[in-house]
Amino acid sequence: FAAEVLYAILMFAQGGLEAKLPVAFRLFDWHGSGALSLAGMVMLMQTVCEASMHVGVLARMPTTREMEALASEAFHIADVNSDDAICLDEFAHWARRSVQTEELLAPFMHARVSVSEARAKAREAKERAREAKAA
């Protein structure tokens, strides 16, 4: 559950994908080895899907079999040098080009824009209230 919360915070945080990828990678590099195993990729995908489901990005959680197949496919695509480990560069390259990444991140990005717009409107309203009070 903690990883889901951290992932959701990361996705809603300021900054672009390039800044977020190393942080996401380190969340699942449990041994600090600089590499993700297939098990790490399964946990990453499961966490991303669970967090996405909780915030309304996904309508349903993939089954265990679907999750394992998705993670395995992603792992083998990302593992460019076929060493059964994904380094940060391989992970970042895969995440930048992954259709699944785009589909999962788009709603977070739109939500962040909506929150930013709401904050801007609130600041404008406060400024107008100050001006009206001063007049």
Image (cartoon, helix red, strand yellow):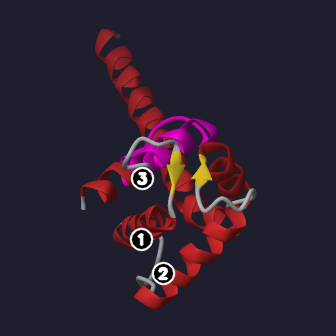
- Residue 64 drawn at (x, y percent): 41, 86
Of 118 and 46, which appears nearest the observer? 46
Q: Mark 1 against mark 3, which lies toward the viewer?
A: 3
Cβ–Cβ below 8 Å for labels 2 and 3? Answer: no
In the rendered structure, which amino acid carries the disc numbered 2?
Met
Q: Secondary structure at mark 3?
A: helix
In the rendered structure, which amino acid carries the disc numbered 1?
Gln
**Quadrant of the drawing holding the C terminus:** top left
Category of crowding for the residue at label 3, using alpha-carbon neighbours closer than 10 angstroms: few (below 14), some (14–19), many (at least 20): many
Q: Secondary structure at mark 1?
A: helix
- Residue at label 3? 28
Considering only order in the chain, which callout, 3 or 1, is on the residue closer to the N terminus? Answer: 3
Residue at far left of view: 1
Q: Secondary structure at mark 2?
A: helix
Measuring 64% from the left and 76% from the top, which residue is drawn there? 73
- Residue at label 1? 46
Q: Is residue 115 visible?
A: no
Residues at marks 2 and 3, CA–CA distance in whole angstroms: 16 Å
Category of crowding for the residue at label 1, using alpha-carbon neighbours closer than 10 angstroms: few (below 14), some (14–19), many (at least 20): many
Residue 23 covered by magenta stretch: yes
- Residue 41 drawn at (x, y percent): 50, 64
Q: Which residues are magenta?
A: 8-28
Category of crowding for the residue at label 2, using alpha-carbon neighbours closer than 10 angstroms: few (below 14), some (14–19), many (at least 20): some
Measuring 57% from the left and 35% from the top, which residue is drawn there? 19
Q: Is residue 50 left or right of residue 20?
A: left
- Residue 49 drawn at (x, y percent): 44, 71
In the rendered structure, which amino acid carries the disc numbered 3?
Phe
